[in-house]
């Protein structure tokens, strides 16, 4: 099994969608209702161990995650497509582009973790691992300090319904440990990095090395959002990534 949570839309521009660490593809629920399904087709993929693929063993490393996503998108028969990814899935989207430069049209990485890995000391790493016991506190304290309490409650409820602690720990290792930064310049795929203005983790400074490595890299801040812009400001998030993916972004973006 290597299933999609949903494939929606009838547009000729195809978009593979990759979720982050704390939640499966249900993280995109608020934005799915706002997406342009006339011109785009979205395929929402759950990494092994998450959501509709909960019965699968977690993927091994970022490379295993990307291999699973590549196999899944191959089953759709898409010859050309764009990639949208969030956080851990944002790094996976960047890696997939380096491996499929002739098929990927564009990339939008929403609050992506670093392709060079995120070095955490032992105490901090263990704190992230133990955050499974209280993900609400971790999200509120380290990722989205201004998230609406009801949105946070729903996120945690879905977290518990769509994954388990083994998956949490396995993918923590996956997103902190990639090492493909030097390969980002191997293609000229238009790539946009989007980050929330109140995200204390993925900031403009954190993303500076990543965007500098890209030949066609753009960075843009999303207002009224932390690490989960698709939940905290869904309308602006959809508008930003659809403009980025289709090449209609405005001058509000800062091109590097």
Image (tube, rainbow, N blue to C red):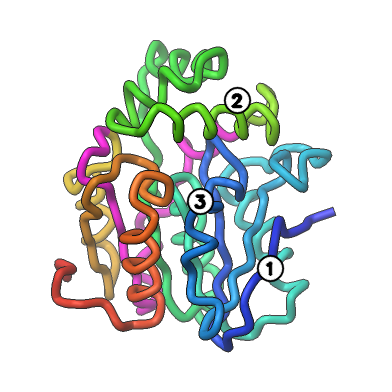
Is 139 drawn above or below residue 238 in the view shown?
A: above
Q: Which residue is mark 3?
A: 89
Q: Position of residue 128 (x, y in %)?
A: 46, 20
Earlier-in-chain disc, 3 versus 1: 1
Q: CA distance from mark 3 to mark 1?
A: 17 Å
Q: Which tag, 2 or 3, sits closer to the chain's start?
A: 3
Badge 3: residue crowd in 10 Å (few <14, some 14–19, many ≥20):
many
Q: Is residue 49 left or right of residue 227?
A: right
Q: Quick one: 76 or 205, which is closer to the camera?
A: 76
Q: Position of residue 141 (x, y in %)?
A: 32, 21
Q: Image check: 60 left or right of 11?
A: right
Work out whether residue 102 can be spotted. yes
Which circle, 3 or 1, is nearer the viewer?
A: 1
The residue closer to the viewer here, 99 or 48, is 48
Magenta-span inclusion, residue 192: yes
At 66% from the left edge and 48% from the top edge, which residue is drawn?
47
Residue positioned most to the front: 150
The residue wearing badge 1 is: 7
The reply to whether residue 103 is visible in this rendering is: no
Badge 2 density bin: few <14, some 14–19, many ≥20, Cα 10 Å: some
Q: Looking at the image, which residue is at 36% across and 18% down?
A: 121
Identify the residue at image location x=34%, y=32%: 143
Distance from disc 2 to disc 1, alpha carbons, whole Å, reads 28 Å
Span colored in magenta: 171-200
Q: Secondary structure at mark 3?
A: helix
First of labels 2, 1 by sequence position: 1
Where residue 208 appears, x then y in whole percent? Answer: 20, 52
From the image, tell me which residue sits under label 2: 169
In magenta segment, residue 69? no
Quadrant of the snapshot with the C terminus: bottom left
- Residue 171: numbered disc: none
């Amino acid at each position: 099994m290597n299933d999609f949570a949903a494939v929606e839309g009838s547009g000729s521009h195809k978009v593979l969608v990759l979720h982050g660490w704390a939640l499966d593809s249900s993280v995109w629920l608020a934005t799915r209702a706002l997406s342009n399904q006339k011109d785009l087709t979205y395929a929402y993929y759950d990494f092994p161990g998450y959501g509709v693929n909960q019965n699968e063993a977690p993927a091994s490393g970022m490379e295993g995650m990307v291999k699973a996503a590549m196999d899944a998108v191959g089953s759709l028969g898409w010859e050309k497509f764009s990639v949208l990814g969030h956080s851990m899935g944002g790094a996976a989207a960047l890696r997939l582009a380096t491996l499929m430069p002739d098929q990927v049209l564009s990339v939008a990485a929403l609050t992506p973790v670093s392709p060079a890995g995120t070095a955490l000391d032992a105490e901090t790493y263990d704190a992230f691992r133990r955050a499974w016991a209280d993900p609400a506190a971790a999200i509120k304290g380290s990722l989205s300090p201004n998230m609406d309490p009801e949105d946070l409650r729903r996120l945690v409820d879905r977290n518990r319904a769509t994954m388990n602690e083994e998956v949490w720990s396995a993918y923590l290792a996956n997103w902190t440990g990639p090492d493909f930064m030097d390969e980002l310049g191997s293609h000229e795929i238009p790539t946009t990095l989007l980050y929330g203005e109140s995200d204390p983790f993925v900031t403009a400074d954190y993303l500076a090395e990543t965007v500098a490595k890209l030949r066609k890299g753009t960075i843009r801040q999303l207002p009224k959002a932390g690490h989960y812009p698709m939940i905290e400001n869904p309308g602006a998030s959809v508008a930003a990534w659809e403009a980025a993916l289709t090449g209609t972004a405005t001058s509000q973006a800062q091109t590097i």
